[in-house]
Image: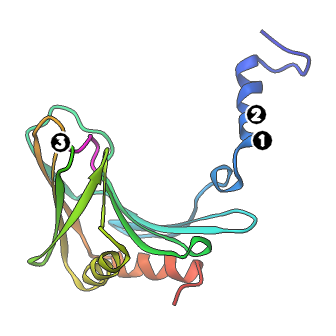
Amino acid sequence: MRNLFGFSSSILSFLIGLFLMPDALRALPKELYIGETWSAWIIKSKNRSVCYVHAEPRKKTGKYLRRGPTYLQVTNRPSEKIYDEVSVTAGYIYKSKSAVVAEIDGQKRKLFTSGGTAWSNNKKDDRILVREMLSGRELVIKGLSSRGTLTTDYYSLIGFTLAYRASAKACGIK
């Protein structure tokens, strides 16, 4: 069905929603760096920038039938004073009140879970984890799904430093 402007009602609804959406959500990510395993991106709006690095696991193990997108990101939001925020998206819902273990070259860190995402417990833990990622070779993430399935994801840290530096530079972080 077409309206006064000649658009279908679903297209008009989409356009109105796009107009009402905050600037940060309307902006599209711009590529800063693309490596073999890591990439860096920026999303700019009028008064803020969000920079992040992104990777998908090189290997995923576990006895699951289906799993959604799985990835790790380190995000910087300077206007909100949020730096080096580490998040892991599992591709499933984590078991309630379970912890995720992040291991880099033998060093283990616990992350808390909320829905399908795991996070460091605080800003200090984020900074430590990022520092270890900058000098490490491999990051292993172990989590437990709401159905009790243990998964292990392996992320290469080769290229993380280049992606991280591109992201930090774009957001004006030293």
Q: Please say if 18 is above or below 101.
A: above
Location of residue 40 in the rendering, given as x and y in whole percent from the top left corner: 47, 69
**Is residue 152 left or right of 77 when viewed as pictured?**
left
- Quadrant of the frame with the N terminus: top right
Q: Residues within 10 Å of mark 1 (few under 14, many from 20)?
A: few
**Is residue 115 left or right of 106 when viewed as pictured?**
right
Magenta extent: 90-94
Q: Residues within 10 Å of mark 2 (few under 14, many from 20)?
A: few
Q: Residue at x 76, y 33 (%)?
A: 15
Q: Residue at x 23, y 45 (%)?
A: 94
Q: Secondary structure at mark 3?
A: loop
Say if mark 1 contacts mark 2, CB within 8 Å: yes
Q: Main secondary structure of the magenta part?
A: loop
Report which residue position mark 3 lands on. Answer: 145
Say if mark 1 contacts mark 3, CB within 8 Å: no
Point out the frontmost of discs 3 and 2: 3
- Which disc is residue 15 wearing? 2
* Residue 151 on the magenta segment: no
Protein image colouring: rainbow
Q: Earlier in the sequence, mark 3 or mark 2?
A: 2
Location of residue 172 in the rendering, given as x and y in whole percent from the top left corner: 59, 84
